[in-house]
Amino acid sequence: MTETTATIDPKEAAHFGTMAADWWDPKGSSAMLHKLNPVRLAYIRTAIDRHWDSDDHGFRPLNGKRALDVGCGAGLLAEPLARLGASVTGLDAAPENIAVAAAHAQGQGLAIDYRATPVEQVSDSGYDLVTSMEVIEHVADPAAFVRALAAKLAPDGLMILSTPNRTPMSRLAMITIGESIGGIPKGTHDWAKFITPDELTALLEDAGLEVTDSSGLAFDPARGFTLSANTAINYLLTARHKG
Ligand SMILES: C[S@@+](CC[C@H](N)C(=O)[O-])C[C@H]1O[C@@H](n2cnc3c(N)ncnc32)[C@H](O)[C@@H]1O
């Protein structure tokens, strides 16, 4: 079993490790993440273009940039970041996910540095982009996790996080419906560990960052996930070093 560290809860790592084999199947146990991926990629792409004023970089706005995706699973976000030109490092608590991620990237001809290493034990830093999508609600110590993410971010870097809000609506959508008929494996979420935007903003500020943008991720059965002002279910935050 994966060891407990400041940020890794071994029970969470074991749970997600059981999902590794069908992670890339859009109808498999990670179906919800496949549904989220296009909309969060659109958000990230806009944030990148704004942050680096990269209109002129065309299809590869992350050329020459280093990206760190923490809690990468089997690489649903890491691979598009590599295609946008970044040199990508992906970390995950579940070694099974890292094995599937590495094999998948190789099959796609993508050179991604995948590691089953806790973020606080990564020795290099200075990443231009740090992402962690749908992860903080699964870590052992959210404050230590955010501090460790912040320590990896370059002085002018960009951090983007997404996570479920802690509201009656998120309990209904992500657990009551999501884990019964919504395709999310049972036991994936503990509502009490969900973090509100204000709580996450406070953790980021304590880690020396400031939030520069936020968006809700709303769901409706006809249109799927969309960016929205409504943060009741899930949301994205962009942050950078203060000052
Ligand atoms: C819901 S999945 C999200 C995967 C990926 N970020 C995505 O959105 O496609 C959560 C992932 O975080 C990983 N994880 C949980 N706690 C972690 C930690 N403390 N450090 C790194 N990865 C962690 C799990 O193993 C799992 O792969």
Image: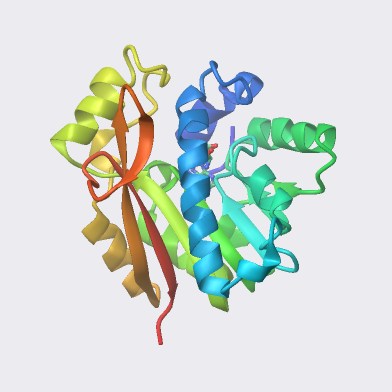
Tell me where residue 165 appears, x and y as whole percent. Answer: 26, 44
Instruction: Name the residue nearer the viewer: 207 or 198.
Output: 198
Residue displayed at 72% across by 46% down: 114
Residue furthest out toward the top: 181
Q: According to the image, what is the colour scheme of the structure?
A: rainbow
Residue 134 occupies quadrant: top left
| Left or right position of 2 against 99 | left
Residue displayed at 41% across by 63% down: 238
Q: In this orientation, does residue 10 appear?
A: no
Relative to 227, is 168 above or below? above
Instruction: Name the residue nearer the viewer: 62 or 163.
Output: 62
Tell me where residue 214 appears, x and y as whole percent. Answer: 33, 59
Residue displayed at 49% across by 32% down: 33
Tell me where residue 191 appears, x and y as whole percent. Answer: 25, 35
Tell me where residue 199 appears, x and y as whole percent. Answer: 24, 59
Q: How many marks?
A: 0
Q: In this orientation, does residue 99 appear?
A: yes
| Left or right position of 173 against 102 | left
